[in-house]
Amino acid sequence: MPQDARSAWRTTLGQLALALGLALALGFAVGEPWPVLTVAALGVVAWHYWKLRRLLLRLTARQRLAPPVGDGVWNQVDRLLYRSQNEVRARKRRLIEMLRAYRAATAALPDAIVVVERNSQRILWFNEAGTRLLGLRHPRDLGAALGDRLQPLPIAHWLAAGRHAEPLLDAPSPVSPELRLSLRLIPYSDELWLLVARDVSKLMRLEQMRRDFVANVSHELRTPLTVVHGYLDMLDPAEQPDWAPMLTEMQRQSQRMTQLVEDLLTLSRLEAQEALPEETVSMASMLSTLKREAEALSQRRHSIAIEDAAGVDLWGSTKELHSAFSNLVSNAIRYTPAGGSIHIRFVSERDGGVSLAVEDTGYGIPAAHLPRITERFYRVSTSRSRESGGTGLGLSIVKHVLNLHQARLEIESEVGRGSRFACRFGRERIRARDRVPYPEEHA
Ligand code: ADP
């Protein structure tokens, strides 16, 4: 027992002994010791009850009562109670302050935050931005199914993917289609997910402006370039020996500029499209076209082989897929020295999909460049790309075309040994080939 409690206990026992001793002495003095002692004992009991009542009052009081003074056990109990009540009040106040600060912080957050129960996908909580960006209403939407509430958003299969869901980078808000959102799902415990929605309207507008600008500039450049290119083509270097080297270089550069403008326009067009017109892409004729083009580009400097092991067709845009594949084939030929070999393989993959791979035995690409190789104008060696007539946009076009087919580009490369660019298509892109191709079509 602590010192305070022990001394209070002693004081109370002392007081009791004193009261009873005095009562006994008084009893003997008046000749009635037992009745006087009984009355005194009853008085002690009454006093204890009165103290108990005060304690009860303190426990039930709404306002704060002043701490008691005195040193008996009851006063000590009362004081301890007063102290613990004060501590509880202070802790509660601190908690409320923290909660207020937390609520103010979530209210100030520009991003919508929704806490979702994982199994039922029901909304447990959301912040103010949840109302502004996602149109959720307090308290109506608490407990509602997230998928139902955000119906116009294409998030059903995204929610189903759960932990493996890729962030949605640009989706229209249910509040207004003008409002563009980027959404991500963050599992933060076994049962709870956090849906975070960010307003990316401004970013998207800027992106759109950039796209429009590039498209407009390319478009505006096209006509004057066609005129210059046309006139330059009419001039025959053989007829102007003095000007011949200059004319040849001018023709080469204007050809390059025209190609650049065409590639920029292709990219702008692909970026502006959400989906392409789709059809069955006959892979047998695609492969034979690729082979013809490769041979024309190579001029017998490389050995070219085609393998059509998948034996299926694809579902997609023949024109765009052809542009992507022929970009890969042209790269393979341009970045492979004479004497090298190029393999174009159309094969089935273990996951049920198919891939079209272009393999070469060329210069290869250092590993450090691979992550950025599909960016516009990114080149490993600018001089080599220029020399080979590249625009630096080929792989960007390939990536865009594949994205529009939910396919991906896999690149493996080793410097000095060669590269492998594989376009991987999911099984949903496969169509049975209804006609056995003529041997010469894919040989
Ligand atoms: P470019 O028009 O310059 O060829 P691409 O976008 O097609 O532009 O390719 C980007 C860069 O990737 C090229 O400049 C080249 O350095 C590298 N590259 C592409 N394909 C190959 C390949 N098959 N072998 C080696 N390097 C390649």
Image: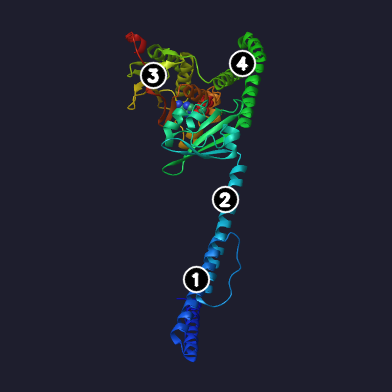
Residue 250: % across, % down: 63, 17
Answer few, some or many: residues within 10 Å of disc 4's Cα (few below 14, many 20 plus, some between 14 and 19).
many
Q: Residue at x 59, y 37 (%)?
A: 129
Residue 341: % across, % down: 39, 23
Q: Which type of secondary structure does the marked residue at label 3 adopt?
A: strand
Q: Residue at x 67, y 14 (%)?
A: 224
Quadrant of image for the C terminus: top left
Instruction: Tell me if label 3 and label 2 are in contact, CB under 8 Å.
Output: no
Q: In the image as oriented, which residue stretches furthest toward the bottom?
A: 29
In the image, 288: left or right of 272?
left
Q: Which residue is mark 1?
A: 49
Three-letter amino acid code at disc 3?
A: Ile
- Cα separation between marks 4 and 2: 72 Å
Q: Which type of secondary structure does the marked residue at label 1 adopt?
A: helix
Q: Which residue is mark 2?
A: 99
Q: Which residue is mark 3?
A: 304
Q: Return the disc, 1 or 3, that comes first in the chain's sequence.
A: 1
Quadrant in the rendering for residue 176 = top right
Instruction: Tell me if label 1 and label 3 are in contact, CB under 8 Å.
Output: no
Q: Return the disc, 4 or 2, that comes first in the chain's sequence.
A: 2
Residue 424: % across, % down: 40, 25
Name the mark nearer the viewer: 3 or 4: 3
- Cα separation between marks 4 and 1: 113 Å
Three-letter amino acid code at disc 2?
A: Leu
The one of 186 and 262 positioned closer to us in this rendering: 186
Residue 415: % across, % down: 43, 34
Quadrant in the rendering for residue 173 = top right
Look at the image and tell me whether residue 414 can be seen. Answer: no
Three-letter amino acid code at disc 1?
A: Tyr
Marker disc for residue 251: 4
The one of 354 and 335 positioned closer to us in this rendering: 354
